Amino acid sequence: MEDHYVRAHTAEGSDLILMRLRDAIAELAGLDGMQVHRSHWVAAAAVAGVERKPDGKLVLVLRDGRRVPVSRSHAAAVREAGWVDKAGP
């Protein structure tokens, strides 16, 4: 997030939008996804897998190869959503 801008990544590309993340998340209500970090909201369909770092923290691996950190405060929701089951061997 860059000040009051949100960088949105989609299959069509990436755009910088003048909007607070909180407001962007409200606009996404009803879509299958969640906030996984104070600076990241991820669509469920974008998640290819989950990695666990040596310190135990989770990192989402997205279908485009990007890695997104999962904060401790959002880790339980990620597990409850079944995203951790997408973790590779």
Image: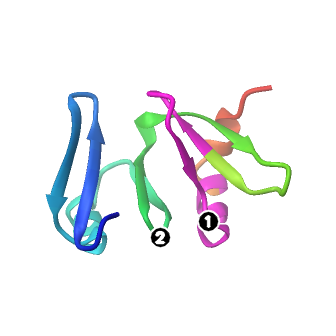
- Is 2 on the left or on the right of 57, as rendered? left
Q: Which amino acid, by three-letter code, is at mark 1?
A: Ser
Point out residue 39 in the picture as x, y percentages from the top left corner.
Answer: 43, 65
Colour convention: rainbow
**Dots 2, 1 in contact, CB < 8 A:** yes
Reply above or below: 2 against 50.
Answer: below
Residue displayed at 16% across by 57% down: 17
Residue displayed at 68% across by 44% down: 84
The C terminus: image quadrant: top right
| Magenta span of residues | 60-79
Point out residue 46 in the picture as x, y percentages from the top left corner.
Answer: 43, 35
Residue linked to disc 2: 38
Reply above or below: 78 against 11.
Answer: below
Q: Distance between the residues labelled 2 and 1?
A: 8 Å
Residue at the far front in the pictured view:
2
Q: Is residue 25 magenta?
A: no
